Image: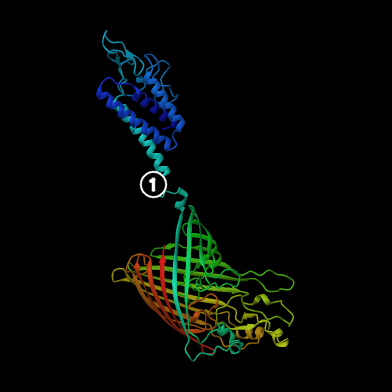
Amino acid sequence: MTKRRIQGLVCLLLAAASASPAMADDLDEVRKLRDTTIALVNALVDQGVLSREKADELIRKAEEAGKKPAGAPAVAAVPGSAGATASGGSAAAATAPGTPPVAGAPGSTGAAAPAASGATVPGKPGEPPVIRVPYVPEAVKQQIRDEVKADVLAQAKQERWGEPGALPQWVDRFTFSGDIRLRGQGDRFPTDNQSNALPQLFQLPDFGAYNINNTQDPRNRLRLRVRFGTDVHIADSVDAGFRLTTGSVGSGGDPSTENENLGNYNTRATVGFDRAFISYRPLSWLYFTGGRLGNPFFSPTTLVWGDDLSLQGVVLGVKPQLGPVRMFATAGAFPIQDIEPNPFNSARSKWLYGYQTSAIWQVTSNFNATLGAAFYDYRHIQGIPNPDPFSTQYSSTAAPFRQKGNSVFDINAQANTQAGTQNYLIGLASRFREANASLSLDLTAFATKHVVFSADWVRNYGFDRQEIFDRTNLNLDPQTIGTQERLAFGDVAYDRRNAWQVYVGYRHVERDAVVDAFTDADFHLGGTNATGYFLGGRYAFMPNSTLGVRWFSAKQIDGLPLAIDVLQLDLIASF
């Protein structure tokens, strides 16, 4: 229904409501009609269908028409409206098609009445004049109500009138999520560790096993992690997303954790983007994603990739369905460190190329298995020594961030040895080409409880003993294998009260099995060259609100003794 047609209907209703009735029953009826019509006009003004000026004009003209003498038009016609009449015609004759003719209208039966609504007819001498009111059939009034109601309701639904907290339609494209974790952490060091004497800790190659200042004194701290992000549905085949999180940012920051240590003299936490991506899915089984991606690979444990790690780069993936088996294949290119060439720098940019195939097999209705095989090929990540004491040609091959464990050497060894300086630049001794096999078995048992077994195996095929000796003058034994297993029992989600899970696991990761910068940051306080066990549990005291406890006990595999026990108590709220 157009605005002009609504205005015409309003004119007709106002004209009928403005006339003076002769009987008490008619007076009540007309008053009700007038009140209803004026309320409707005000509602149309509130919703923008009519302006206040136009509404006041329609009411004024209708009231004037109700007072005009016989023969005058009842209402100023609105061209094209349902209430429009020919000049000098009867307003009562303007009825909807198929409705009974109005008394006095051409073609109607019965005595003709004056054409104007509210017209005065002289009565007998000594008696008051007779005032005639135009008759609007009930069917016409009901039709007007239904049409206006349907039109207003349709507009109200589209524009979400009166809906509490109503937001524009484009907001529905956003899906928000996040969590806040408050952690109390205690680090403990057995008494047989190597002492804190720094000259001993900085001896090479044992330096690579440490990269830690404290090896004896207990430490207690509060840590905070806050994450908030959104996924955005841009179009049928295009999605995007981003997430903000606490943790160190910029070059030299820690990519393995998003924790912020409390106790920084109440200064504000640093916040940065750990996810920001665009994804295009031209087919249901084919997708392309680029940006900061999180972890695009199937990774059931933290052996290769830490929980908080977010890779950056581009990924091409396919995921066809083959009966009860869902297949996945992922290939990606990820820049690790961008290095700009110049006449004094021969180092090359560092990249990771990752490839993985995996499959989810729904064996039975309550049991599924996921298997994956991956190969992670790091390019130019190994350090190269500077050729003379005054050269900086390969200084950029040093690792900008490490945890601890990998075999390392001093890129500036000639300058530090011959000139007596201590300008250490620590580079990775080994190349890294990691073959990784992953497994996850999920059995639903005891109603909603799950038994989940997860395992990872990795081996670094980039380790070449002779090549390392030629480049670094280090004679190293190969320690290139890592394994991690975890067995959990309980719920897999914490969106309801009293959900819980307990777990236990074992981890053994040798010195050069994986790049220590990107593996787990909690076991042995991060890095490689460690073996031991872990256990823990988590309980939802309210939906999406949990308490958790974790215990790690680990010791160093090779080199100077370093055992570390870690206790973590977590309070987590997710949304």
**Placement of 335 over or under 471, stated as above or below:** above
Res. 111 image quadrant: top left
Q: Position of residue 7 (x, y in %)?
A: 42, 29
Q: For this view, does 157 lie left or right of residue 470?
A: left
Quadrant of the image containing the N terminus? top left
Tag 1, which secondary structure? loop
Q: Position of residue 518 (x, y in %)?
A: 53, 74
Quadrant of the image containing the C terminus? bottom left
**Placement of 230 over or under 188, stated as above or below:** above
Q: Identify residue type, mark 1.
A: Glu
- The residue that appears at 39% across and 74% down in the rendered structure is 548
Q: In front: 73, or 442?
A: 73
- The residue that appears at 66% across and 72% down in the rendered structure is 348
Q: In front: 389, or 295?
A: 389
- The residue that appears at 41% across and 15% down in the rendered structure is 88
Q: For this view, does 6 lie left or right of residue 251?
A: left
Q: Position of residue 527 (x, y in %)?
A: 52, 79
Label total for image: 1
Confirm whether residue 96 shows in the render.
no
Q: In front: 492, or 423?
A: 423
Q: Position of residue 481 (x, y in %)?
A: 51, 82
Res. 572 image quadrant: bottom left
- The residue that appears at 64% across and 71% down in the rendered structure is 349
Q: For this view, does 473 lie left or right of residue 315?
A: right
Read off the residue under disc 1: 163
Q: Around disc 1, counting alpha carbons within 10 Å, would you say few (fewer than 14), some (14 to 19), or many (20 or more)? A: few
Q: Residue furthest front?
A: 126
Here the colouring is rainbow
Confirm whether residue 176 shows in the render.
yes
